[in-house]
Amino acid sequence: MYRERPARLSGAVVWASTPTGGGGRVLPDGCMDLLWHEGRLMVAGADTRAHLTEEDGGAWYGLRFRPGGAPAFLGVPAHELRDRRVDLADLWPAAEVRWLNDRIAGAADLPTALEELVLERAEAPEPLLRRLVAALDAGRPVAATADELGVGARQLHRRALDAFGYGPKTLARILRFGRALELARAEVPFAEAAARTGFADQAHLARDVKELAGVPLGVLLGRGP
């Protein structure tokens, strides 16, 4: 069972996931997470493809940062963690992480404890990064967005790598995938969902879903074999 709620950190979400049998499929969404699982603090980097989880009996808790929000908290460029799950102790001093592990383990509400930890240390994302995410999530072309932000294409690419883990074109593709998936889950016909979110056609949407999610859209939504 999965449940989530908005965090007190702007744009973030705190969540908990209790195994119900079988593994899971975590889809690319442009975000990074601080995780707690069986006594360990971990970090989930931004994904460029679906991450398959195995059923191991333990509950997971996490805080999902808004796109671009995690690197300032972690002190690590996002591209170093792309498509990776690592222990926080690999990024921060071991003694500090041991103290934090003990602190979280003793909390009555684990998601809230993670939230409070992040609130103590988090920094607001740069306004440029927020504007970049907003523009790309609205379907604006990358080149036009760079012009509007007043930065060159190479500089924008470097900033995106550090903040999101990949360049702005990949971020735009993942955000578009998320918008289409949201419509499809609301039972909007696939062809209409593709048109409304900037895909050339339904076939284009199908290719992106297969590459990013690893399965066809119908299977992802539980409507196909």
Image: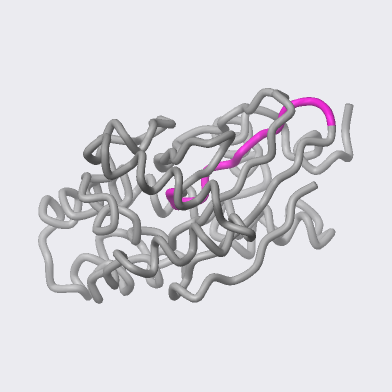
Is 77 placed left or right of 109 in the picture?
A: left
Q: Nearer the viewer, residue 92 or 20?
A: 92
Q: Residue at x 28, y 50 (%)?
A: 74
Residue 148 picture location, percent across and down: 22, 75
Residue 29 on the magenta segment: yes
- Residue 67 visible within the image: yes
Q: Main secondary structure of the magenta part?
A: loop
Q: Is residue 86 above or below residue 204?
A: above
Could you say which quadrant of the image residue 123 lies in? bottom left
Q: Is residue 178 above or below residue 5?
A: above
Residue 213 picture location, percent across and down: 61, 35
- Residue 44 visible within the image: no
Could you say which quadrant of the image residue 55 lies in? top right
Residue 132 picture location, percent across and down: 31, 67
Q: Nearer the viewer, residue 68 or 72?
A: 72
Q: Residue at x 26, y 38 (%)?
A: 95
Is 176 placed left or right of 80 in the picture?
A: right
Q: Residue at x 51, y 33 (%)?
A: 49
Residue 137 on the magenta segment: no
Q: Residue at x 68, y 46 (%)?
A: 202
Could you say which quadrant of the image residue 94 lies in? top left
Q: Which stretch did the figure color magenta?
A: 21-32
Image quarter in which the C terminus is found: top right
Q: Nearer the viewer, residue 149 or 48?
A: 48
Q: Is residue 108 above or below residue 150?
A: above
Q: Nearer the viewer, residue 95 or 148?
A: 95
How many numbered marks have been drawn onto this rendered protein structure?
0
Q: What is the image's colouring? A: one colour
Residue 70 picture location, percent across and down: 34, 55
